Amino acid sequence: MSFWRVLLSIICPPLAVIDKGCGSIIIVFLLWLCGWVPGVIAALVILNNPKR
């Protein structure tokens, strides 16, 4: 996970996971709409997942 990905996940979480698939984008976007913190946490968890 690069510095730019972390920075992008803090600023706009859905853009940080854009290459992880449509499901990830939708989940992060919905959580981001519920609040900024859940969206950031979800984006960081998805980016840290070594299987994707």
Image: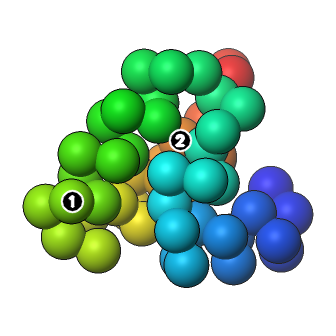
Q: Residues within 10 Å of mark 1 (few under 14, many from 20)?
A: few
Q: Which residue is mark 1?
A: 33
The amino acid at mark 2 is Ile
What is the quadrant of residue 27 in the picture? top left
Quadrant position of the N terminus in the picture: bottom right
Which residue matches tag 2? Answer: 46
Give above or below for 17 relative to 50: below
Q: Residue at coordinates 36% horizontally, 33% vertically from top-left?
A: 26
In the foreground, 48 or 31: 31
* Identity of the residue drawn at 29% across and 60% down: 32
Residue furthest left as drawn = 34
Q: What SS does tag 1 mark?
A: helix
Pick the front one: 1 or 20:
20
Q: Secondary structure at mark 2?
A: helix
Which percent across, then down, holds residue 28? Answer: 37, 46
Mark 2 near mark 1, Cβ–Cβ under 8 Å? Answer: no
Amino acid type indicated by mark 1: Leu
Q: Is residue 11 left or right of residue 31?
A: right
Can residue 50 be seen in this snapshot?
no
